[in-house]
Image (cartoon, helix red, strand yellow):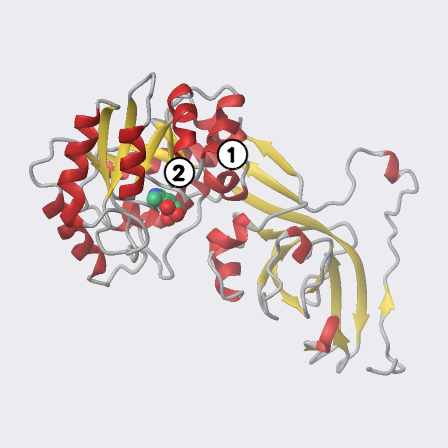
């Protein structure tokens, strides 16, 4: 335990305290602001860069941005959507989304096929057992199948030697109206790796002689691999305005962040040099330090692993996280932001502090910090 020294912290009074505050609609200030205009900008960028049709990947609740709201915002212009599974697709249909919806993992049981046909869902076939299930199932409507090749990622997808035969069997089954040929990149975010060019070559060889549209490119593919064949592209992360690359990349600079994770300062105190902050005393003030506490924690999805020094914006100025992130609160250094006080707005990530910066500091990726968001209410602008 650190003893309370003579210079122990003094909490600054909240001169703005309003005893009627609880009557107002706004309560805990931790919120995610979702800019749907930025989402549309990023979708258009994917199309502009590729000249292809684009399925907006909105699985996992649109990477934490709200799948239904994002789909409604894009529906007028999107060529379609992609989700992981039928539960996610049915949520979109229940919300009135009529555009094509692709199931990226296909079906898990043959019993889903009737629903897939009934709701006009498009379906990936990535394994021979799925092909057999389609052959054996009676369907009232023909399916649109995206036939997935394992071009080198070795997660799911048909072996190149089985690809032609699977295509012919789907056609011969009489259950399929249309086939799109697809594969998925494992390392497109590594701009100097050979792996992506090798995957493209494997895909090109496997689709020789098959007269069908094709789809390879995810976000890093859209932004960084113009040589990949693409009737269709499948951008996910880039729609939300975050770069998939660890290095600067020209096209990624054109993305607009969609989510602003924001909150407010709820307490401010002055500490002399040598005092610890937070659980485990992971920060000890190297100088007299003004500490702000923000209503945001790992229960909201802010990464607990974010270390001292992770950037944060308060009252319009960049400063940094200090001490361990707690469940509901985190601490920031206000020493050089004297204008910041109780109630000052804080951006945890957004247009000034990029989610990819926070992710890198926390040793993770923007995909994960977006998907981890929870408890925080979402507000939408730019409808
Ligand atoms: C098959 C497939 N296509 C496209 C995407 C979208 O990828 P990204 O978010 O990198 O654009 C994913 C996401 O994991 C995927 O699994």
Residue 35 is left or right of residue 186, and the answer is: right
Mark 2 nearby-residue class (10 Å; few <14, some 14–19, many ≥20): many
Above or below 46: residue 340 = below
Give the quadrant of residue 277. bottom right
Q: Residue at x 8, y 41 (%)?
A: 208
Mark 2 and mark 1 residues within 8 Å of each other at the beta carbon: no
| 40 horizontally vs 383: left or right | left
Q: Quadrant of residue 66?
A: top right
Q: Can residue 352 be seen by looking at this rendering?
A: no
Mark 2: which secondary structure? helix
Choose the circle earlier in sequence order: 2 or 1.
Answer: 2
Q: Where's residue 45, x and y in %? A: 34, 37
How far across and how far down the image is residue 184, in percent?
28, 48
Figure quadrant of residue 126 = top left
- Most distant residue in the top direction: 140
From where the camera sits, is residue 191 visible?
Answer: yes
Any mark on residue 249, and which?
none
**For discs 2 and 1, the disc positioned in front in the rendered view:** 1
Res 42 label: 2
What percent of the width, then of the height, locates residue 205?
A: 10, 47
Looking at the image, residue 262 sits to the left or right of residue 272; the answer is: left
Q: Is residue 186 above or below residue 76?
A: below
Q: Residue furthest left?
A: 209
Q: Does residue 262 appear left or right of residue 115 in this picture?
A: right
* Residue that appears at 40% across and 52% down: 243
Mark 1 crowd level (few <14, some 14–19, many ≥20, 10 Å Cα): many
Say which residue label 1 marks: 67
């Amino acid at each position: 335990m650190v003893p309370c020294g003579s210079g122990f912290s003094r909490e600054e009074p909240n001169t703005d305290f309003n005893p009627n505050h609880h009557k107002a609609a706004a309560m805990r200030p931790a919120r995610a602001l979702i800019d749907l205009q930025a989402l549309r900008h990023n979708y258009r960028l994917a199309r502009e860069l590729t000249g292809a049709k684009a399925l907006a990947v909105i699985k996992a609740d649109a990477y934490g941005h709200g799948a239904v709201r994002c789909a409604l915002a894009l529906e007028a212009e999107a060529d379609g959507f992609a989700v992981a599974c039928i539960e996610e697709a049915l949520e979109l249909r229940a919300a009135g989304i009529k555009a094509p919806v692709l199931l990226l993992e296909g079906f898990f049981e043959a019993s889903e096929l009737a629903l897939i046909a009934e709701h006009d869902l498009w379906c990936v076939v990535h394994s021979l057992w799925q092909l057999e299930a389609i052959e054996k199932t009676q369907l009232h409507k023909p399916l649109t199948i995206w036939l997935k090749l394992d071009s080198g990622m070795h997660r799911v997808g048909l072996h190149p030697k089985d690809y032609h035969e699977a295509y012919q069997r789907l056609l011969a089954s009489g259950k399929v109206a249309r086939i799109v040929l697809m594969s998925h990149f494992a390392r497109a975010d590594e701009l100097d790796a050979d792996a992506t060019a090798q995957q493209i070559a494997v895909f090109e060889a496997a689709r020789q002689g098959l007269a069908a549209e094709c789809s390879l490119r995810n976000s890093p593919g859209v932004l960084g691999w113009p040589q990949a064949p693409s009737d269709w592209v499948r951008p996910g992360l880039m729609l939300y305005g975050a770069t998939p690359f660890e290095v600067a990349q020209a096209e990624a600079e054109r993305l607009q962040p969609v989510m602003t994770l924001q909150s407010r300062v709820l307490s401010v105190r002055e500490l002399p040099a040598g005092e610890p902050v937070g659980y485990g005393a992971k920060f000890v003030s190297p100088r007299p330090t003004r500490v702000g506490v923000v209503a945001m924690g790992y229960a909201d999805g802010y990464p607990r692993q974010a270390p001292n020094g992770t950037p944060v914006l308060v009252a319009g100025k960049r400063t940094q996280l200090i001490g361990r992130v707690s469940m509901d609160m985190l601490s920031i250094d206000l020493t050089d932001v004297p204008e910041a006080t109780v109630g000052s707005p804080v951006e945890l990530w957004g247009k000034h502090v990029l989610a990819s910066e926070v992710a890198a500091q926390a040793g993770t990726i923007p995909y994960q910090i977006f998907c981890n968001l929870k408890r925080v209410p979402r507000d939408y602008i730019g409808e």
